[in-house]
Amino acid sequence: MKKLLALSIAVAISTPAIAADALVVYSAGPKPLSTGLAKAFEAKTGIEVELFPSTSGKVMARYEAEKANPQVDVIISAAWEHALTLAEKGDLLAYTSPNAQKVPGSLKTDTYVAQGAATLAMAYNTQSGLPKPANWSDLTAPAYKDQVTMPDPASSGSALTLLQGLTTKNGDAAWAMFAGLKENGMIVPGANKAALTPVLQGAKGVVFGAVDYMALGAQQKGESIEVIYPQEGTVLAPRPMMITKSSDNQEAAKQFIDFVLSEEGQALVAERLILPARTDVKALRPGYDELTLIDLDAVEAAKNAANDKAKFTTLMAN
């Protein structure tokens, strides 16, 4: 019988039994995008999708917990590091979609490809009365005392990417800046939503390292938020899609990747204010050519991820 349901998993999430012919997709948020893609794919192909939408951390924890009894066919993460790690382990199926021709080489390999990408920015509450920041280091100034939040790199893959981008570019000066932010009262309350919510509510004034599509979405809904891309540059946070080698529904999995990279699928990505992976699909927010991006070696960053997270955690705890 295909894909028996595990009685319990490490992430302590109960799910219904999976249909024998269903395509199983574990996807990092935003949930409306995951759901929209699944429904559109079902409508186009008639293939049922069993979707587990969650955070990248929970998606990967579930995958690891089920290794003895694999269930997932397609994984979509918000952290490029996860794809690198699984590829190195030999856990991924080699597949290049014909729809990936317009995806930049930096956003695809033989075993995974970007669904799209976010960038990291400052989310500034325009009603806060604070001066409008222009650079990351501005937030160490006394004017921002106790007014800054940041997503935790230990629970946010995008925040980790920003941490590594800045420390790779600026070395000790970047670590000194983070120490200055800590001294200035910056809080690190959890993942991306936990960092953004206090700023939306007016309890804090600025997010350092907001996922831009989340902040842009809040702005679109009428929140008093401005998204600021620092002048000295920011990082791209691509969202990898991958087919597990253990999948016994590989042809449907390939069709799903093809669909997400189709013009229809990429338009759904764009609607959520995420950068489409394909450069020929119009972005509904600042595009690749409008951003100053920090060059980050993803392979080297993945090797250093554990040490960088630990160093940041120690710095914020002191």
Image: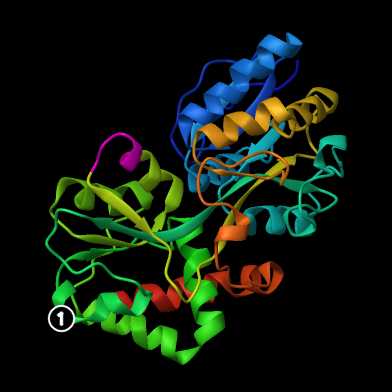
| Disc 1: which residue | 142
Q: Is residue 301 above or below residue 202?
A: below
Q: Is residue 221 magenta?
A: yes
Q: Which residue type carries mark 1?
A: Pro
The region drawn magenta spans 218-223
Nearer to us in this view, 196 or 87: 196
Residue 245 located left or right of residue 162: right
Residue 318 seen anywhere in this rendered image of the structure: no
Q: Residue 135 in the image: state x and y as whole percent.
A: 37, 75
Q: Is residue 115 above or below residue 85?
A: above
Could you tell me which residue is drawn at 54 percent across and 45 percent down?
61
Q: How is the image coloured?
A: rainbow
Could you tell me which residue is drawn at 67 percent across and 28 percent down?
265
Q: Residue 148 in the image: state x and y as whole percent.
A: 23, 66
Could you tell me which residue is drawn at 55 percent across and 68 percent down?
292
Q: Is residue 82 magenta?
A: no
- In terms of image quadrants, where is residue 42? top right
Nearer to us in this view, 183 or 132: 132
